[in-house]
């Protein structure tokens, strides 16, 4: 069983809708959590970075971490066609440790 | 700053051939790493380095060699290519920004390798 599970999608939503993405994990030592966005044929780029449990908001993006349930989420409000990409979650037990990535969820926002 | 630069972008090899994927970063980052990305598998760590002269294995190191002689460069060597090594390879670096660890990995654009 993988340490990090993520539904590969694709997840198709109409423009303006809320996109909801999530990852589950099995290693209770994870405390650093990230979301990366990857456009086709490009390298991933960091969207959100959170430490331990709680919520973090940045513009249209909200990241949530529930360590008791070993579950993290990313919400994208007012989705745009430019949000169409693959979203990868990543997590680690320590800030300089090895990050475990989810398989990525493909999101398609249709105009 | 160019960030993280990978070469070549595309490569086709025959089984048994060897080659080196190059990675260079101009951000003075201590940490550099190599990942491979396969459909349904996400990014898997091959090797990483926390500074010049220091390397360690990741999740899938077999068939790959690395060395770190300078802070800027972190080449990945395929010793004897196999079809199972057909993948997209990403180099990533990480360091301190203004004295703070932002936790961000900076990725290159990727190198697409096909082994026939």
Image (cartoon, coloured by chain):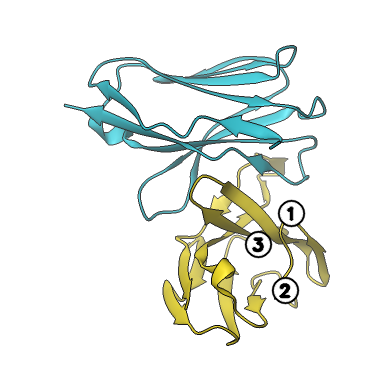
Chain colours: A cyan, B yellow
Q: Evaluate whether label 2 is on the same chain as label 3.
A: yes
Residue B6 visible: yes
**Figure check: A51 above or below A36:** above
User: Disc 2 and disc 3: Cα gap in Å?
Assistant: 19 Å
Q: Evaluate whether label 1 is on the same chain as label 2.
A: yes
Please identify, in this view, whether the residue under mark 1 or under mark 2 is nearer the observer. Answer: 1
Between discs 2 and 3, the one toward the N terminus: 3
Residue denoted by label 1: B59
Residue B25 visible: no
Q: Evaluate whether label 3 is on the same chain as label 1.
A: yes
User: Disc 3 and disc 1: Cα gap in Å?
Assistant: 25 Å
Q: Position of residue A40 (x, y in %)?
A: 35, 50
Residue B112 badge: none
* Apparent side of residue A66 relative to residue A20 in the rendered image (left or right): right
- Residue extending farthest to the bottom is B17
The residue lying at 61 percent from left, 31 percent from top is A5
**Quadrant of the drawing holding the N terminus of chain A:** top right
User: Disc 1 and disc 2: Cα gap in Å?
Assistant: 14 Å
The residue lying at 55 percent from left, 83 percent from top is B15
Q: Residues within 10 Å of mark 2 (few under 14, many from 20)?
A: many
Between discs 1 and 2, the one toward the N terminus: 1
Please identify, in this view, whether the residue under mark 2 or under mark 3 is nearer the observer. Answer: 2
Q: Secondary structure at mark 3?
A: loop
Query: Label 1 is found on which chain of the structure?
Result: B
Residue A61, picture quadrant: top left
Q: Residues within 10 Å of mark 1 (few under 14, many from 20)?
A: few
Query: Label 3 is found on which chain of the structure?
Result: B
Residue B28 badge: 3
Between discs 3 and 1, the one toward the N terminus: 3
* Apparent side of residue A103 relative to residue A99 in the rendered image (left or right): left
């Amino acid at each position: 069983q993988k340490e990090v599970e993520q539904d590969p999608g694709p997840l198709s939503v109409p423009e303006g809708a809320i996109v909801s993405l999530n990852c589950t994990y099995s290693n209770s030592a994870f405390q650093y959590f990230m979301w990366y966005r990857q456009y086709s044929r490009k390298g991933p780029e960091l969207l959100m970075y959170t430490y331990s449990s709680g919520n973090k908001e940045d513009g249209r993006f909200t990241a949530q971490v529930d360590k008791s349930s070993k579950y993290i989420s990313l919400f994208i409000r007012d989705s745009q066609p430019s949000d169409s990409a693959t979203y990868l979650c990543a997590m680690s037990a320590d800030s300089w440790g090895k990050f475990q990535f989810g398989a990525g969820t493909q999101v398609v926002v249709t105009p | 700053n160019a960030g993280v630069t990978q070469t070549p972008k595309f490569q086709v090899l025959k089984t048994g051939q060897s080659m080196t994927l190059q990675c260079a970063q101009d951000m003075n980052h201590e940490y550099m790493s190599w990942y491979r990305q396969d459909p349904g598998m996400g990014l898997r760590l091959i090797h990483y380095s926390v500074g010049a002269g220091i390397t360690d294995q990741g999740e899938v190191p077999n068939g790959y060699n690395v060395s770190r002689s300078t802070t800027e460069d972190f080449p990945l060597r395929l010793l004897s290519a196999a079809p199972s090594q057909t993948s997209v390879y990403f180099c990533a670096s990480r360091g301190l920004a203004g004295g703070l660890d932002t936790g961000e990995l900076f990725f290159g654009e990727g190198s697409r390798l096909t082994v026939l």
